[in-house]
Image (tube, grey):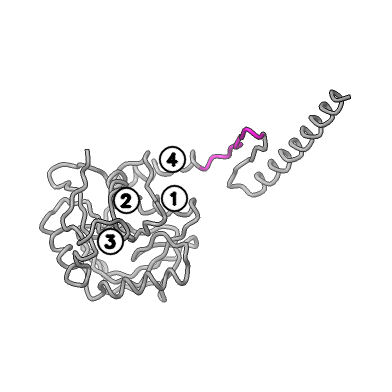
Amino acid sequence: MDVVQHYRRAGTDKRGAVAYSFCTLVTNLPQYQAMVEGFLRLGFTSADCEFLYIDNSGSNQADAFSGCNAFLRRASGRYVVLCHQDVMVLEDGREKLDKLLAALSEKDSIWAVCGNAGIDAHGRRFIRITDPFMPDQAIGKPFPRQVMSLDENFIVVKSEANLALSRDLTGFHWYGSDLCLIADILGWTAYVIDFHLRHDSRGRVDQHYNSLRSRLRAKYTRAFRPRTLRVLTERNVYLSGNHWASAGVNAAIDVAISLYAQFKRTVLARRGK
């Protein structure tokens, strides 16, 4: 069943002609309508922007993983904005986001996701937001800053990257991290940019958050397990995140392949006599 609905359609339905697709899981329709009106007011008009939502106000039609995957499949925009219903634009609007994404593409053409809050591989936080904790935060500036995970309140996905979230995870937490991980595996990068908006939530670290953390850890422990990639040509490759183990095992495999090839040549030569 298709659970994605249009709140506002763009003036065109031709894929690529739509600039932004704003996609939201909705539990509070008045709050969502206020969010949409804010973006419309600051230049994200229906001329070339669309607003898609999944109505979870009565009961959950989709969780964040399945819902965002549905959005990424359905959205027509060059940029797919996965955002919460409780974000509100302040002064930064269409003109600024256009400029920020153009500048990011100039800096790093292989970016795939960007947002307003994240953390890098060294544990450094980069945040550009107003929220219940503090107004007008600009931690870690100047932006943009490359990160390894993003907060889910506002994430811009470049549709060209053809990203998706994990099929085997469910829930409403950790999907920003999952998306950044998958982007990294596929050869793309993630950034925090200087797009300032307000997020009216403190977030929630509860039993559901911790349960999904455990499931995400188990999923990627399995996904990143060492393995030998076997192929029909018999030029197998050992894959491991451990550099030394990978180098050692692959060196042994290469020797075995060479010896086997030499053995085959010898056997064929003898048969030809």
Observer-side mark, 3 or 2, equals 3
Label 1: which residue? 182
Q: Residues within 10 Å of mark 4 (few under 14, many from 20)?
A: some
Q: Earlier in the sequence, mark 3 or mark 2?
A: 3
Q: Quadrant of the N terminus?
A: top left
Observer-side mark, 1 or 3, equals 3
* Displayed quadrant of residue 113: bottom left
Disc 1 marks which amino acid? Ile
Residue 147 in the image: above or below residue 2: below
Q: Earlier in the sequence, mark 2 or mark 1?
A: 2
Label 3: which residue? 18
Label 2: which residue? 72
Disc 2 marks which amino acid? Leu
Residue 183 in the image: above or below residue 240: below
Alpha-carbon distance for marks 1 and 3?
25 Å
Alpha-carbon distance for marks 3 and 2?
14 Å
